[in-house]
Amino acid sequence: MAEQIYIGTSGWSYPRGEGSWKGHFYPPGTRNELAYYSRFFKTVEINSSFYRPPDPAMARKWAEVTPEGFLFGVKLWQKFTHPKMYEAATGEVAAISARDVELFESGIEPLGRVGKLGVLLAQFPPGFTNDGYGRDILKAVINTFAKYRLAVELRHRSWSDDAGTAALLKQAGASWVATDEPRFSSSVAAEIPQTSAISYLRFHGRNAAMWWKGNVETRYRYLYSAEEINQLAQKVEAASAAASTVFAYFNNHYQAFAPRNALDLARALKLPAEGSQSGMLWPEE
């Protein structure tokens, strides 16, 4: 049975657009969103690190405003996991250098120094397939960040169709992320092997209608029902039986559906509340 279960959300800052958390999770006038967020949860995924390496000064501030025992999941820079996306966004070739790795590591060092660096997340895109190129990229990422606790999100069925994938991750001590999202013929298997002492789950929502044609807001417009939360709780309990530590993050971020469902899951698992929920803006259901 896992000694610790950490439940949180993928990101905490969604200030603009129709999916904004303002007025849904954050009360008007909230000055420090992360400090407020950490009243209710003891972990969060850092999303901004996907777009650029963290700034060390900012990472120090994140560590300072969160309580002792709070852990950050840090998404790897897209240059490491999404080379085509990086090249399209920057016009630069995604050739990874030792300097790139040093830049990223210096940004997360303030979190590691105070014991708040939980896991690095290597999130690969749905179209990342198990071919020669894909395996080379995966092995390079695993080897580069071998000294950290690493979770790997592989979402194409070619990975789960190959027993060698689990063997590779087990040998490296990396966790294979269990993903909940709409199911398609190309999707990774619904049940994946336990490959490390850490279980890492990500819940993206099940908005199949908008998954491919929606934007960054509408794709994640999905609120898990009470029945679905109970199903996810069973998955977390099963993961807990096989791991020493469990991380579970909701990425259905539209209008703060993610923190709402994260609290639902914590209640379903009968976990102690991290803080007073009297200030929550949505009603109990």
Image (cartoon, helix red, strand yellow):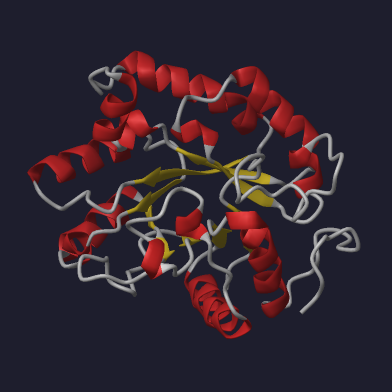
Q: Residue at x 84, y 40 (%)?
A: 30
Horizontally, residue 59 falls left or right of residue 75, namely right
Q: Position of residue 41 (x, y in %)?
A: 73, 55
x and y, in percent, of residue 263 in the image: 71, 67
Question: Can residue 73 be seen?
Answer: yes
Q: In which quarter of the image is residue 279?
A: bottom right
Name above or below for residue 84 compared with residue 279.
Answer: above
Residue in view at x 38 percent, y 22 percent: 101
Q: Does residue 8 appear in the picture of this structure?
A: no
Q: In which quarter of the image is the C terminus?
A: bottom right
Q: Farthest left residue?
A: 132
Q: Where is residue 132 in the image (x, y as percent from the top left)?
A: 8, 44
Residue occupying image coordinates x 49% and y 56%: 218
The single residue placed furthest to the top in the displayed view is: 99
> Which percent across, then down, holds residue 252?
54, 59
Q: Which of 228 and 88 is in front in this view?
A: 88
**In front of the other: 93 or 137:** 93
Q: In this view, does 158 lie to the left or right of 68?
A: left
